[in-house]
Amino acid sequence: MTEPFLRPRIEQKGSRPGCRLAIQLPSRELYQKIDMDAVEQARESEFLTLSLPPLAEDDPFFAGKKRLLNARELKFKFLVPLHSSAEEVLQIADQMVQTARILCMNEKELYFAGDDDIGPFSPRNEIESLNLILVIISSSISNVKDKAVEVLQLLRDTTIAMVKSVGDSNIHKMIATKFSTDSEELLLKWGKDHGVRTKLKIAYFEEAGRGAVASEDMSIGDIALEIPVSLIISEDLVYNSDMFDVLKNLDGITSDTMLLLWSMRERFNPNSKFKIYFDTLPEKFNTGLSFGVESLTVLEGTLLLEELLQSKEHIRKQFDALFPALCDNYPNIFQQELYSWDKFLWACELWYSNSMKVVFADGKLRTCLVPVAGFLNHSLCPHILHYGRVDPASKSLKFPVSRPCEAGDQCCLSYGSFPASHLIMFYGFLPEGDNPYDVIPLDFDAPEAEDGGNQPPIGENVSATHMVRGTWLSKVDEAHAYGLPPRLLAHLRALLKADCAGLRPRTPEDGIDKDVERNVLEMILSIFEPMLEGICDSDNFDRNNSSWDVKLSLDYKDLQRRIISSTVTACNCGLQMLEDM
């Protein structure tokens, strides 16, 4: 992702500021690398060869993914006997899924995966992996016949069933309290009059405000929403306005900041092409950037408090650098009543919470507002994963579903693999369910290079930035893993070994070095016990009568306490286990 406009510069390690609708493009590029020669070679043989795209050497996590693929002896080409039993076909399908999961891993999924963990790693990863396999099957089925078609159909049905199972096991249904009002109906009509095609309607949910609901059943690959390029709000609108003649001469101003200033004026332009769109936007976005004093007080002891304070300070400095100077020097373009601090903050929240990164037909990545698409809410188990590239043939932005969505169900997409702090700060909500990307970052000094089983995996990024998440998410069965990340433990073992003069590196044959293990767990406890003490109890607050921001702060604090407490408990249990050995 490129940096959005007015990006707060968070100094705290591990913070992830950003804007809405983070683009998920990697697997689209993977699709383009499918080797169809294998299908040709297998046409007249007794085998059907299916090929997943190879691991790209420019993948930022190439070394880690390659290590996992090698450790599990996974491959990219699969020979399927045409006279296989259903059980044999399903075994091959399982191997394909394991490979696809690793290909589709992101940084955090890779970090927490143990060598014996075959997945699933997250709902997002699972849906993307299965859709990758479906692309391979769909591309192959038109090039074969007879028995090969039957085999591919079995694989396809099995994969679709797995996709449906992911959705069924991650259901957090919200009940619509009412459907679109006059303003939303006007927006949909305006959109359709200008070329929008959609299988969605707008509804209100008590837990999430407005959202998009399927107006009919949608299968994998169906287009839920299609927006013509002419309705996408991008930097080109600024370049063609009178405002650009002024802004282009300002030192250091970005196109994203120009867009923000343009939208502040366009919001109140009665003749704007986008007037109906701006009229449907809320008066308040209720993101973390609007948190009041009481809610910030609740966050005492959390990293989110520091991130919010830094973000607010950054935005305020940006405003002060622009105003009132622009209003004083160019009053005809920057009317003072349209460029107050409150309206500036509103525009910041609009772009942070509703913008998306879009790759246009010219290959350029732009920050945009996309009318109607802003109603799609985020889910940890999204229906829509890939939506960030303009189709050059239709000159439109398409939102295909990657898992089925029944009529009447809320249709969601993925804003990105973000932790709770990011989602609260820029979007103003906590997602339903266990978020595998809720992590607490840790920084350590890098250990001296040494051989042996204590070193981080060879060829991987040996950055000293590590992380923990709730131990209830751990599926690692390795001895003495304690529910903690294997890479964190390996790093600390190596760090402590390097500090112990005369102590040779541990090898698998040596077994567990109890002294080092004890020191590792005590080091982690020394970090997390003060954190736990620093987060006061939330029971003293009256949640039912609290404001929205206080409730959200309390929910976040409870989540942080749960993660920290699980880490402390894991370490104490590990120490007791060592004592009993």
Image (cartoon, rainbow, N blue to C red):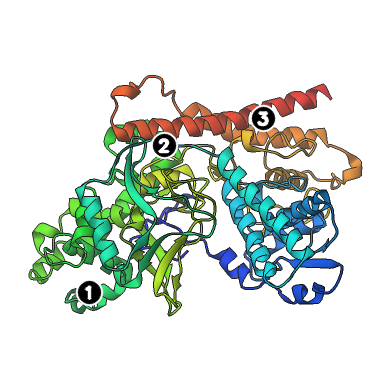
Determine the residue located farthest toward the right in the rendered image: 509
Give coordinates of residue 116: x percent, y percent. 77, 45
- Could you say which quadrant of the image residue 371 lies in? bottom left
Name the amino acid type tagged 2: Met
Could you tell which of marks 2 and 3 lies nearer the N-terminus? 2
Q: Which of marks 2 and 3 is in front?
A: 2
Could you tell which of marks 1 and 3 lies nearer the N-terminus? 1
Q: Are there few (<14), some (14-19), or many (20+) residues within 10 Å of tag 1?
A: some
Q: Residue drawn 30% across and 51% down?
A: 313
Give coordinates of residue 6: x percent, y percent. 33, 61
Give coordinates of residue 8: x percent, y percent. 37, 56
Q: In this figure, which residue is indicated by the disc labeled 3?
A: 570
Asked if residue 413 is positioned above or below residue 204 in the image, the reply reads below
SS at circle 3: helix
Could you tell which of marks 2 and 1 lies nearer the N-terminus? 2
151 on left or right of 523: right
SS at circle 1: helix
Q: In this figure, which residue is indicated by the disc labeled 2?
A: 174
Name the amino acid type tagged 1: Leu
Q: In this figure, which residue is indicated by the disc labeled 1?
A: 247
Q: Residue drawn 68% across and 45% down?
A: 488
- Asked if residue 62 shows in the view, the reply is yes
Q: Which of 325 and 355 is in front in this view?
A: 355
382 on left or right of 122: left
Q: Distance between the residues labelled 2 and 1?
A: 44 Å
SS at circle 2: loop
Name the amino acid type tagged 3: Ala
- Asked if residue 443 shows in the view, the reply is no
Q: How far apart are marks 1 and 3 (CA)?
A: 55 Å
Q: Residue drawn 85% across and 59% down?
A: 83
